[in-house]
Image: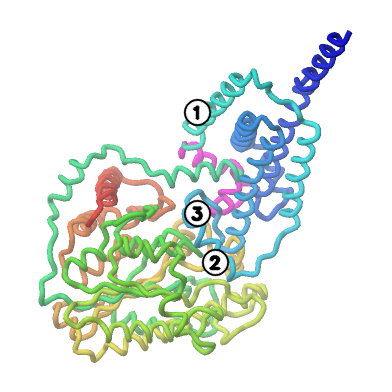
Amino acid sequence: MRAKKRNKSISCLRSERQPSKERRVLTALLLTAAALCLHLLCLFLGTWYFTLYRFVSYFYEPEIFLLNLIPVLLLVAFFYFLTNRAWLGFLIPSLLLLVVGIVNYYMIALRGEPFVAEDILNAGAGLGILKEYELTVPIILILAVAAVIGGTVILAIFAKGRFPKNRWWLRLALLVLTVVLAGVSWQQLYSDSDRYDQLLLTNADRFNVWKDAENYASKGLVYSFLHSVDTMLPEKPDGYSEEAAQAILADYPDADIPQEKKVHLIITMLESYADLSELESIRFTADPYAEFHALQKESYCGVLYPDTIGGGTINAERAVLTGFSYPQPRYSRNTESYVRYFGAQGYATDGGHPGYEWFYGRSSVNAYLGFDEYHFYEDTYHALTTPENAYLEEYLNDSGFFEERFAAFEQRDVSKPYFSFSVTYQGHSPYADDALNGAEYVSHEGISDAAYFTVNNYLNSIADTGKQVSAYVDRFRESEEPVVLVFFGDHKVTFGAGNSYYEEMGVCTQEYTTEGFRNLYTTPYLIWANDAAKQALGRPFVGSGRDISPCYLMAEIFDCCGWKGPSWLQYQRSIREELPLLQSKNIYKTATGYNAELSQAQADALAERRIVEYYVREQVPN
C-alpha cells in the first residue's frame, strides 16, 4: 500500500516537473508575441522623435519590416535556448536593443547623427560629453522600459515551458541552428551594402532620406544598426598583398627634410570652425569672419571636406596626422604617422587640447602616433582655467589656449626644430538657445527664437576665435625663427535636430546633392608663414588651395614648404588629382560634380590606394 502511494507521489511530481504540451505551446506563443512586440517597439523608437505617421510607414514596406524582425526573433530564440527561461530569452535582447534605441535617440537629438556600431569603440568619450548637456527623458522612453519590465513579468508568470534536462541535446541543436541562421542572415542580408543602398528611396515619402539620421530611421533601427557593424570590421581590400603594396611604394622612397629647410610647423585644429558666410541664403547683419578673412588674404587657403558634421572630431584630427581615410583604425598599438616622420627628422613633437585626456582615447592614441608629449585638461589646462577665460564654465577658451601654446613654443628645446599639433575646445556645442550672449550676426527675420539664439551664440564664438587666431599669428610675424602656422576646422556645426535651423535659414541640407553636400561638409584650411620661413623655404605661401579631404592636408602643407616627404605622403600626392575627396559618404569629386559615380581611372586609383593604405596601417613602427 505504501509502495503504491509512493509511486503515485513520484508520478505526480514528475508530471508537475515536466511541462505539458499546452504549457510548451503557451510558452512558444507568448515568447513569439513578446518578440514581435519588441520588434514593434524598436521600430517606434527608431523613428527618433516618435511619430505614429512614420511608424506606420514600416507596415507598408514588407522588406524593411522583415529585415528588422528577423534579428529580434533570432536574438530571443538564442537567449531562450541558451538559458531555458522564456523571461530571460526576452529580457536580455530587450535590454540590448533598448540601449541601442535610447543611445540613438540622444545622439540624433544632441549631434544630429544616428548611433552606429563604430560609436561603441568611443563609448567612454560619448558618456563623458553627456555632462555638457541637460538631458530630458521623453515619456516614450520611460514607457518603453516599463513595457519591457511588464513583458518580462508576464513571461516569468505564464511562460514556464522549458526543455527537460534529458533533452539537452535538443536545446543545443536549436541553439546551433539559431547561430547558423544568424550567420547566413548576416552574410546574405545585413552585410550587403548594395541591398541597403537600394532601399534609399523605399520609404522616402515619410522620411527625408537625404539626411543621415532620417535615412537611417527610414530603414528601421535594428536593420540600420546591424548594417553599420560592417564598417567597424575592416577586411583586406580586393587584390591585397604585402608584395603588391611594397612594389607600389617602392617608386616613392622616403625623403629627408634638408637641414636648412627644417622650419617650425605648428598646426591647430579649430573646434567646429566653419565659414557660414559661404552659405548665400544666410542673412548676416555683421561679419563674424572679418579677422579670419583678412588672414586668408595673406595665406595659402582652401576647403576641406571632413567626414562628419556636428561630431566625430577625431576623424579629421587623425586623418591629418596619418593620411588615413575614413573610417580611422582603432589605434591600439604604435602606428605609422606623420608625427613619427617629424620625430625621425629630429623634430621635437608636442601638442595640447583643453579637454580630458580620456576623451577619444587621446592620451594613449597620441602616444601610439609618436608624440613626445601632449598636454590635456588634467595635467595643464585645468590649472590655467579661470572664470574669465573659461568656455562652457570648465574648459580653457581660445585666448588662454593660444597663450599657453605660444608659451610652449618659447619654452621648447631650441636645439631641435619644432612640430606641434593642437586642438581647441572653444566652439564646441551646446550653444544657448534661449538668450543672446553677445552681438547679433544673423537676422531674426524668418527664423525661430531657438534658431536665432543658437546660430548667433555660435557665431559669437566664431568671431572671437578669429580674433584670437589673428593675435596668435601676429606674435610670430617678426620672429627670426622660421614658423609655418596651419589652421583648419574639424567639421561643420549641427544646428537644431536634423539640422532644422539650417533649413529655417534657407540652406539646402540634402546630402546627396552637390549643393547640400558642400553646405554640410566643408571647413576652411589656412597655411601661413612668417618672413623668416618664406626666406628659408623660398616659397610664397599665398594663393588658393585644392578642395581636399583631411587625409591630404599634410601633403598640401609639404607642397607649400617644398618638402618631398615620406613614401606614404608622396604616394598620396600622386593620386590626389585623381581622387581629391575620400569621404565617408562615398561621394567623390568628378568631372561632373560631386557624386558617387567614378570614372574607370578613378575606380582603379581608389582600389590601388586602398591596398597601399591597408599596408601602411598594418605596419608597427618601433
Q: Position of residue 257 (x, y in %)?
A: 14, 69
Badge 2: residue crowd in 10 Å (few <14, some 14–19, many ≥20): few
> Residues at badges 2 and 1 in contact (C-beta under 8 Å)?
no
Total numbered labels placed on residues in the image: 3
| Residue, disc 2 | 129
Q: Which mark is residue 119?
A: 3
Name the image quarter holding residue 499.
bottom right
The amino acid sitting under disc 1 is: Val
Residue type at mark 3 is Asp
Q: Which residue is mark 1?
A: 184
**Viewer-proximal residue, 532 or 391?**
391
Callout 3: SS:
helix
Is residue 336 visible in the rendered structure shown here? yes
Q: Quadrant of the N terminus?
A: top right
Q: Tell me the element at label 2.
A: helix
Q: Which residues are magenta?
A: 192-219
Res. 271 image quadrant: bottom left
In this rendering, position of residue 404 left or right of residue 388? left
Please say whether residue 209 is one of the residues in the magenta stretch.
yes
Can you tell which of label 2 and label 1 is closer to the viewer? 2
Q: Label 3: few (<14), some or many (≥20) within 10 Å?
A: some
Is residue 113 found inside the magenta-colored segment of the image? no
* Residue most extreme to the front: 2
What's under tag 2, amino acid-wise?
A: Ile
Disc 2 to disc 3: CB gap under 8 Å: no
